[in-house]
Image: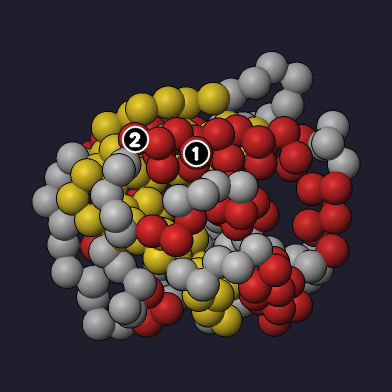
Amino acid sequence: MGGDRDWHDWHRDYADPGSALAQRLRVVQEHIGAWLDERPEPRLTVVSMCAGQGHDLLEVLAARPDAARVRATLIEFDGRNVAAARARAAAAGLEGVTVREADAGDLAAYREAVPADLVLMAGVLGNIDDAGVRRTVATLPSLCAPGATVIWTRTRRAPDLTPAIREWLAEAGLAELAFTAPGGVLFAVGAHRFTGTPEPLPAEGRIFRFR
């Protein structure tokens, strides 16, 4: 992962309910909860790119009586965030959660974690260049199970790439379920359903690099 940002300290804004990050988290969690409600299967798989400390998925699962049916792989590069996510999952008794210390931009990180019924890309697309965003979207058919849901976030700071992202998602076989872009803040959250045909995961390759 590139750049000088401290990705552990970055998570502190989640503790402020009024922060844009906390507001975005609530929208993402609402989508995760709705997805779980819509999918009654006894086993569901989730993969989370650049999962950080796992606030989005782990907080939802910790509050649900059906959490045991979820098998989730959280992919995170920062070792401190990995430790925090593992501690959070253990404290909540989420035995189906694996937190993998790996580079989510490397396709090798997804072995044995995909195809997934839910792909989370929260905090990913706003921290990679435009070419990386397009490659990431184009890779989704290799990460998604049939009928999978993809939840993603992106800043709308100018130049706003979200219109292009939504077009690229459609080109990759993902139909839009929801797009939330609240007034007064610059984040956007999208939820899309994979309607295309899954593709094999390439044996190796790079999708993106964090800036």
Instruction: Determine the residue positioned at 17% across, 69% down.
Output: 200
Q: In the image, residue 211 lies at what x, y percent?
A: 64, 64
* Residue at 25% from the left image edge and 82% from the top image edge: 203
Location of mark 2 (residue) = 38
Per the rendering, the mark at residue 58 is none
As shown in the figure, which amino acid type bears the numbered disc 2? Glu
Q: Position of residue 30 (x, y in %)?
A: 55, 34
On-image quarter of the N terminus? bottom right
Q: Say left or right for 182 vs 30.
A: right
Q: Is residue 51 left or right of residue 196?
A: right
Q: Earlier in the sequence, mark 2 or mark 1?
A: 1
SS under mark 1: helix
Q: Residues within 10 Å of mark 2 (few under 14, many from 20)?
A: few
In the rendered image, is residue 167 in sight? no
Determine the secondary structure under disc 2.
Answer: helix
196 with respect to 205 (left or right): left
Q: Given contact means CB atoms under 8 Å apart, are the residues at marks 2 and 1 in contact?
A: no
Q: Quadrant of residue 116?
A: bottom left
* Residue 19 visible, this orientation: yes
Residue furthest left as drawn: 197
User: Residue 200, relative to residue 30: is it above or below?
Assistant: below
Hey, what amino acid is under mark 1? Gly
Q: Position of residue 82 (x, y in %)?
A: 66, 76
Q: Residue furthest front?
A: 65
* 172 left or right, relative to 155: left
Q: Which residue is mark 1?
A: 33
**Residue at 23% across, 75% down:** 202
Classify 179 as above or below 24: above
Residue beneath the point at 85% across and 55% down = 12
Point out residue 104 in the picture as x, y percentages from the top left corner.
49, 71
Q: Counting other residues with Cα less than 10 Å from the Cα at mark 1, is it few (<14), some (14-19), or many (20 or more)?
A: some
